[in-house]
Image (tube, rainbow, N blue to C red):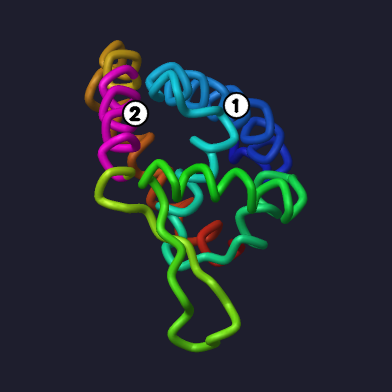
Amino acid sequence: MPVSSDIVVRELLDIVPVIMGAIRSEMRSRRTADLTIPQFRAMLFIDRNPGCSLLAVAEHLGLTPPTVSKMVDKMVYNHLVKRVPSTTDRRMIVLTLTPEGQPILEVARNGTQAHITEILAALPANKLDVIHQAMNLLSPLFSRQV
């Protein structure tokens, strides 16, 4: 009997937050001690959205632009993030990670990937293939929503 989309949606709503919580927890545990969690989250956002605005980071973090501006000032001072004038609008400043900031995220990502690989190693190859197929189906559907 085919599974209804309502059941699949309920299952997604149940498991995705659990998976994201595990990923967030692992990533946070691998950040450097002098980097706050909001700074780390901002760096992740900037890495995924190079050339983003301060406002976009503020909206993502759920913080006010002045708060994020102060936070970014500290990250610029520590050579983790760079403020660059926009090439399309000279009144706008865009954010990018610096060569010093990039390895901080790489260490966290690589460690998190290794941890999740260990968790998934308990599954047989055919089940990993099913997960892979599901990710390939979901990715284009939700990538358009962002």
> In the rendered view, does 61 fall on the left or right side of 36?
right
Disc 1 packing (10 Å; few <14; some 14–19; many ≥20): few
Instruction: Say if 111 sits above or below 119 in the image.
Output: below
Which quadrant of the figure contains the N terminus?
top right
In depth, the one of 36 and 49 nearer the eye is: 36
The residue depicted at 54 percent of the width and 29 percent of the height is 20
Percent x, y of residue 13? 68, 34
In depth, the one of 32 and 138 nearer the eye is: 32
Which range of residues does the magenta coloring cover?
A: 102-115
The residue depicted at 63 percent of the width and 47 percent of the height is 70
Mark nearer the viewer, 1 or 2: 2
Disc 2 packing (10 Å; few <14; some 14–19; many ≥20): some
The residue depicted at 58 percent of the width and 77 percent of the height is 92
Q: Earlier in the sequence, mark 1 or mark 2?
A: 1
Q: Which amino acid type corresponds to the residue marked 2 in the rendered image? A: Ala
Location of residue 116 (image quadrant): top left
